[in-house]
Image (cartoon, rainbow, N blue to C red):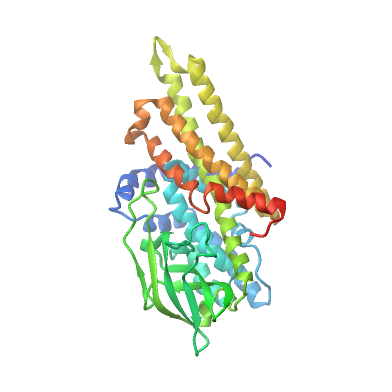
Amino acid sequence: MFRLDEQTQMVATMVRQWCQSQLAPKIPALEAGTEMPFDLMKKMAKAFGFDAMLGASVQKRIAKLRAGEVAGDAEKTLSAGVGNPMMMHVVVKELSRVSPGFAMGFGVSMGLAGGAIVSKGTADQVERWGLPLTTLQKIGAWCLTEPGAGSDAFGSMRTTAVPDASGGYVLKGSKTFITNGPGADVFLVYAKIERGEDSGVATFIVERTMQGVSVGPPFKKMGMRDSPTSEVFFDDVRLGVEHLLGGKEKGRGGRTDTKDSLGSERSGVPAMAWGIIERCYDASLAYVRERKQFGRAIGEFQAVQLHITDLFLKLRTVENVVYRTAWMQQNGVRDMPFVNASKAMCAQMAVDAALKAIQIHGGYGYMEELGIEKLARDAKLLELGAGTTDINLLACARELIGIEA
């Protein structure tokens, strides 16, 4: 269970080589915002055959839906195309060693937006939107957070979908901090159904080209600068019932769908943390063996040895979390307390590891050219996105105690 199979090891090696030759040289331009990452994501999907493998898996899903099968587990559906969920976690890990932001944009489009449609959508929706998103022919975005609705996503939600006389809806509101917003072709939008009383939250598939859809400029951020993020506005966007995910309203059950997607997003954070910590550990270990002060390698000093041991323990802990997460996904095991708590823990460990690696490298660690300061800036978002650390820990506690969220 705690060892990569030969195929996954081979993919990891190939992705690491691709990151060094194709992704790393683009980092300065991506961070400066002079280039967008979306074409590079599409090239990566083709380079490793993800478009073909996942496309075949999604096509099977479409056939089963047309034959009468109901919605299932998105992660199992998507992972079937590449053999096992661990492979996708390893891909995210390898990308995160170089660019956590690129990994996040890739995961949001393929796994979060595409995965939600493949899991919850009708056969027509999966074919029209799920297939091009999971194969990265199109770029997707997941729209939940609003200017006044972050941690209290449901209670403070102001984006509404008002039923109209034609049987469709009129979508109005805005979302913020939207990953891939500046370049997304398809937005998965969560909105309250407005019927004079709260009929629950529903999910809508919205295309960028629709009248009333507009996108703000990319935000300037502390980290994850190579992941374009923006506001998205919906000004009386008219949607047919075919844009309602699943084809029917679910009342308060729509919140369950949203929480499932949040769980999927949180399940991807440990793999990103794994990549950040592994890069910090590898760089620090090499540095303390080579760097000499007072006539000997700094790795001979006990204080430095303790730092290296701490990085090693963080690395193995987060790695084990990813293995367990992959096992859960492979076997259809639902354990939200574990997902929420491990997301919080791994995010904290990534931040701590990056700061420790900077400390080990001294002034060199503070310089851009080494790349560790970027990992520190990027890692911080893992403690904020997909629910803050406090919210994730509270969600874990409430599930354990049995308090309804």
Residue 349, position as x, y percentages in the image? 53, 37
Image: 137 above or below 29? below
Q: Is any part of residue 5 visible from this angle? A: no
Q: Residue furthest bottom?
A: 165
Q: Quadrant of the N terminus?
A: top right
Q: Describe residue 337's horizontal placement relative to residue 357 as left or right.
A: right
Image: 134 above or below 280? below
**How many numbered discs, if any?**
0
Residue 95, position as x, y percentages in the image? 46, 46
Q: Describe residue 72's horizontal placement relative to residue 48 as left or right.
A: right
- Give the camera-side residue of 26 and 151: 151
- Give the camera-side residue of 325 and 88: 325
Q: Describe residue 108's horizontal placement relative to residue 329 as left or right.
A: left
Residue 210, position as x, y percentages in the image? 39, 77
Image: 385 above or below 356? below
Residue 215, position as x, y percentages in the image? 35, 66
Q: Residue furthest left?
A: 34
Name the residue located 49 percent from the left edge and 35 percent from the top edge. Answer: 352
Q: Is any part of residue 230 visible from this angle? A: yes
Name the residue located 63 percent from the left edge and 65 percent from the top edge. Answer: 256
Instruction: Tell me where residue 346 sits by quadrant.
Output: top right
Q: Quadrant of the C terminus?
A: bottom right
